[in-house]
Image (spheres, grey):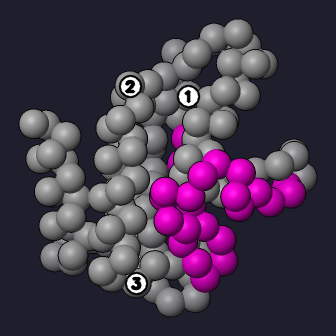
Amino acid sequence: FFYDQLGVHPYAGGRGEGYDPRLEAGQRDVEAGFGVKDMTFRGLDRLREQVYEDEGIWRDVVIGEFGYDATPGNWYYVAEPTRATYLAEALRQAGAWDWVTAFTVYTGEGFAIDGTPADEALRQATARLRE
């Protein structure tokens, strides 16, 4: 089969905890049924390198979903205002990678950002990227 871009949901964290997107790739690896899964945001670069090794093509990446849950105890949980800092940093990092072509913040149940510090932080980070 053929595809042009690699679509990913690089959630960073585990049950009850979201990880700082500044963590280096490989610092939160977990064993999965298909091999090692890097649970850091920067693990996205590692995944892209693996795709290159497997296919011989550097793929652009679409971040189809990313976010942190604001519900204590849930997967990828991070309380405000730390959640705002983490989301803005993840967007900044994605903007620095010329191979990331889209970044979508997931806003489903528990992940909503409207009217939160995360909402304002993302607006400011987006404005800085446009400068």
Is residue 55 among what the camera can see?
Answer: yes
In this rendering, would 123 be left or right of 74? left
Disc 3 to disc 1, C-alpha distance: 30 Å
What stretch of residues is rendered in magenta? 8-32
Percent x, y for residue 49?
67, 27
Q: In this figure, which residue is indicated by the disc labeled 1?
A: 6
- Where 35 falls versus 58 (above or below)? below
In this rendering, would 97 be left or right of 92? right
Q: Are marks 2 and 3 in contact (CB under 8 Å)?
A: no
- Where 52 falls versus 108 (above or below)? above
Q: Are marks 2 and 1 in contact (CB under 8 Å)?
A: no
Identify residue type, mark 3: Ala
Crowd rating for badge 2 (residues with CA inside 10 Å; few <14, some 14–19, many 20+): few
Give whichever of 67, 26 is nearer the camera: 26
Asked which quadrant contains residue 58, the reply is top right
N-terminal of the pair, mark 2 or mark 1, is: 1
Q: Which mark is residue 98?
A: 2
Identify residue type, mark 1: Leu
Crowd rating for badge 3 (residues with CA inside 10 Å; few <14, some 14–19, many 20+): some
Q: In this figure, which residue is indicated by the disc labeled 3?
A: 79
Asked which quadrant contains residue 102, the reply is top left
Q: Judge depth for marks 2 and 1 and give the one in front.
A: 2
The quadrant the N terminus occupies is: top right
Disc 2 to disc 1, C-alpha distance: 14 Å
N-terminal of the pair, mark 2 or mark 3, is: 3
Which residue is located at x 10 percent, y 36 percent?
131
Which residue is located at x 49 percent, y 30 percent?
61
N-terminal of the pair, mark 3 or mark 1, is: 1
- Which residue is at the far bottom? 72
Which residue is located at x 32 percent, y 38 percent?
95
Disc 2 to disc 3, C-alpha distance: 30 Å
